[in-house]
């Protein structure tokens, strides 16, 4: 089996990608910073940093495949330039290192945030979007990073791009913003909700979609890896039924949520502590992030299962690991 480099294996999605590859018999090398650690995986750790090109040359040496899953995924940062350094410059550095090493295939993990959201239908890979349409530094940095991957593909580098939606499941260490919704719900810290919506998908299905993209994806193409379009109210109702906790009944007007985002984010900028309601997240909630994964099903054979099992695993894992 080929030697494979996975970036981001210390995080949620990267961990599941590395785990799947390992169980399929791949020789997995996991890039991690000196301050990170790889937990519960049988992989070869290699110390490096996306912002340090020399460390990446060593990491990709001898690799046939690269799965670039790592990203600085935050909806607030006291220094937003950190996101651009990791997400954009880091992607440039890794792509160059992979090109120099003659890697046979690269799967770049983008985000559904780089998909356009039309008003009257689901978004797909062909829905137009520009950086001016994007709210916040995370989405903008990921859009710019995706442009790096697309440009490299046009220049001949064998890059395939996947655009996961909101993953749910076990081993959400940090947790991610989606996982935080579940944790806050279980802690009773979600007294109200806004009228928004997400496409959610089992993180294990996203990991499988990465492998399918490596095997069947067309170079330079984007593939949405998602499953169910649900309003936040529907998600919370499902969590209530699974956990035995009551779902919040109060629907918060967007203007009130926006005001809370302004206040808490301004306070965070002064104190350096993460805001309770990041303004970037509130702005993202203005649109329902509903998309179609039809192209991935058609071209890759991507067939995600219902998200009920993933939500159950997330609840059980967060409870078992002391998050709530």
Image (cartoon, rainbow, N blue to C red):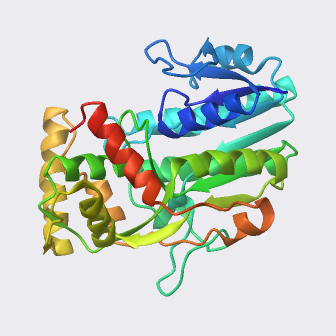
Residue 209 drawn at (x, y percent): 67, 51
Residue 81 visible from this viewpoint? yes
Taking depth in this image into account, of 48 and 238 the one nearest to the observer is: 238
The answer to which image quadrant residue 221 occupies is: bottom right
Residue 151 visible from this viewpoint? no
Residue placed at 62% from the left, 37% from the top? 17
**Quarter containing the N terminus:** top right
In the rendered structure, the answer to whether residue 272 lies left or right of residue 15 reads: left
Taking depth in this image into account, of 18 and 141 the one nearest to the observer is: 18
In the rendered structure, the answer to whether residue 109 lies left or right of residue 4 reads: left
Residue placed at 61% from the left, 14% from the top? 45
The answer to which image quadrant residue 296 occupies is: bottom right
Taking depth in this image into account, of 41 and 66 the one nearest to the observer is: 41
Identity of the residue furthest to the bottom in this view: 120
The answer to which image quadrant residue 317 occupies is: top left
Residue 111 drawn at (x, y percent): 55, 53
Residue 177 drawn at (x, y percent): 35, 48
Residue placed at 15% from the left, 72% from the top? 252
In the rendered structure, the answer to whether residue 142 lies left or right of residue 296 reads: left
Count the numbered circles shown: 0
């Amino acid at each position: 089996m080929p030697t494979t480099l996975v970036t981001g294996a210390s995080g949620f999605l990267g961990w599941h990608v590395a785990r799947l590859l390992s169980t399929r018999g791949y020789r997995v090398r996991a890039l991690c910073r000196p301050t990170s650690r790889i937990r519960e995986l049988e992989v070869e750790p290699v110390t490096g940093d996306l912002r340090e090109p020399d460390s990446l040359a060593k990491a990709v040496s001898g690799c046939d495949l690269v799965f670039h899953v790592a990203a600085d995924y935050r909806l607030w940062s006291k220094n937003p330039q950190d996101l651009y350094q990791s997400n954009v410059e880091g992607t440039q550095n890794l792509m160059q290192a992979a090109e120099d090493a003659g890697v046979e295939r690269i799967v770049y993990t983008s985000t559904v945030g780089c998909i356009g959201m039309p008003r009257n239908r689901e978004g797909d890979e062909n829905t137009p979007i520009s950086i001016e349409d994007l709210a916040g530094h995370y989405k903008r940095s990921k859009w710019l990073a995706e442009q790096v991957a697309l440009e490299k593909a046009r220049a001949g580098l064998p890059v395939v791009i996947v655009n996961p939606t909101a993953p749910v499941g076990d081993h959400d260490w940090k947790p991610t913003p989606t996982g935080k919704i579940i944790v806050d719900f279980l802690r009773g810290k979600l007294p109200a909700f806004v009228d928004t919506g997400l496409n959610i998908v089992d993180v294990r299905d996203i990991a499988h979609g990465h492998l399918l993209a490596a095997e069947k994806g067309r170079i330079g193409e984007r593939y949405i890896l998602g499953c169910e379009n649900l309003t936040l109210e529907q998600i919370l109702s499902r969590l209530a039924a699974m956990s035995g906790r009551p779902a919040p009944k109060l629907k918060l007007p967007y203007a009130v949520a926006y005001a809370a985002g302004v206040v808490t984010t301004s306070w965070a900028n002064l104190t350096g502590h993460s805001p309770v309601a990041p303004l970037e997240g509130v702005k993202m909630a203005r649109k329902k992030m509903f998309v179609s994964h039809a192209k991935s099903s058609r071209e890759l054979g991507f067939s995600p299962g219902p998200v009920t099992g993933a939500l159950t695993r997330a609840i059980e894992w967060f409870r078992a690991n002391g998050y709530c």
